[in-house]
Amino acid sequence: MKIIGLTGGTGSGKSVVCTYLKENGAYVIDADQIAHDIIKKGMPAYEEIVNYFGESILDENRNILRKKLGSIVFVNEEKRGFLNRCTHKYIIQEIDRQIEQERQKAESTVIVLDAPLLIEANLQNRCDEVWVVFAQEEVRAKRVMQRDSITYQEAKNRIGCQKNWEAYEQYADLILDNSKDLQHLKKQLETVFSARILKENGEKL
């Protein structure tokens, strides 16, 4: 069973790639979804985060306001570092659990680990290949603004908190260019999926 690590900066288009791979039989582990789940009330990271950041990040039901938390950490490197250290250990535990579970089931030939912080969390060591989605910074900023209903400056702050392109590129076994339209990306995926996945498993597209 092959494990593909999928990463890239926010707004690069990883979700489009994941959707395509899932539709073609891959099992996708969504690290972002895991990160959302582990900070819910009663979950492992919740108390650590509230103790550190204080109750100002909570809503009236004492749930963590992710947008409020994000507005803090995206402009403060020290607090962002704490949040990453706190959450990464729980995210990795859940990723390992899902990988082992899928291996036991043996229903998929490919596991896709969709993780924006794949490199930062050293998750590339669990992968057979690392695929990086590339898009120009201004294209990404516009996508993030539309996706998250935030300002241009907020989008640029988020992009600025992540690794630069050269840092992603040095880990890439494959680069997918998503600076153009959706059709351009899908053509790359069709070629790559046929060449790297189906042929390896003796199947036909």
Image (cartoon, rainbow, N blue to C red):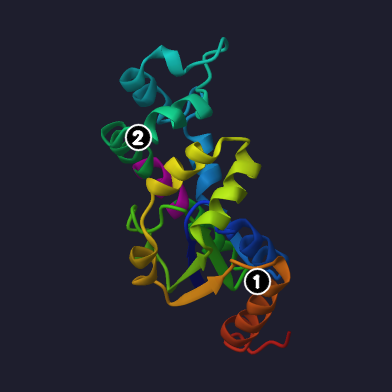
Q: Is mark 2 on a helix, strand or loop?
A: helix
Q: Which residue is more in the foreground, 133 or 84? A: 133
* Residue found at x 43% / y 74%: 128
**Relative to 133, is 26 on the left or the right?**
right
Residue at 50% across, 49% down = 31
Q: Name the residue under label 2.
A: 83
List x then y, in percent, for residue 155: 51, 42
Q: Which of marks 2 and 1 is nearer the N terminus?
A: 2
In which quarter of the view is residue 205 placed?
bottom right
Q: Is residue 95 one of those drawn in magenta?
A: yes
**Residue drawn at (37%, 25%), measured in percent from left and top?**
49
Asked if the stretch drawn in magenta spans residue 159, the answer is: no
Q: Depth check: 189 or 47 in front?
A: 189
Dot 1 lies on which element? Answer: helix
* Dot 1 alpha-carbon crowd within 10 angstroms: few under 14, some 14 to 19, many 20 or more: some
Using a 10 Å C-alpha cutoff, classify the residue at mark 2 as few (fewer than 14 neighbours), some (14 to 19) or many (20 or more).
some
Q: Main secondary structure of the magenta part?
A: helix
Indicate the position of residue 16 as horizontal and vertical percent values: 65, 60
Q: Can residue 101 be seen in this view?
A: yes
Please indicate whether residue 10 sits to the left or right of residue 117 in the image: right
**Residue denoted by label 1:** 185
Image mark for residue 120: none
Residue at coordinates 62% horizontally, 56% vertically from top-left?
A: 15
x then y, percent, for residue 57: 45, 18
Query: In x, y percent, where is residue 112?
Result: 54, 64
Q: Is residue 36 above or below residue 161?
A: above
The part of the chain drawn in magenta is: 89-96
**Badge 2 amino acid:** Leu
Q: Residue furthest top?
A: 60
Amino acid tagged 1: Leu
Along the horizontal axis of the image, is 178 left or right of 94?
A: right
Of labels 2 and 1, the one closer to you = 1
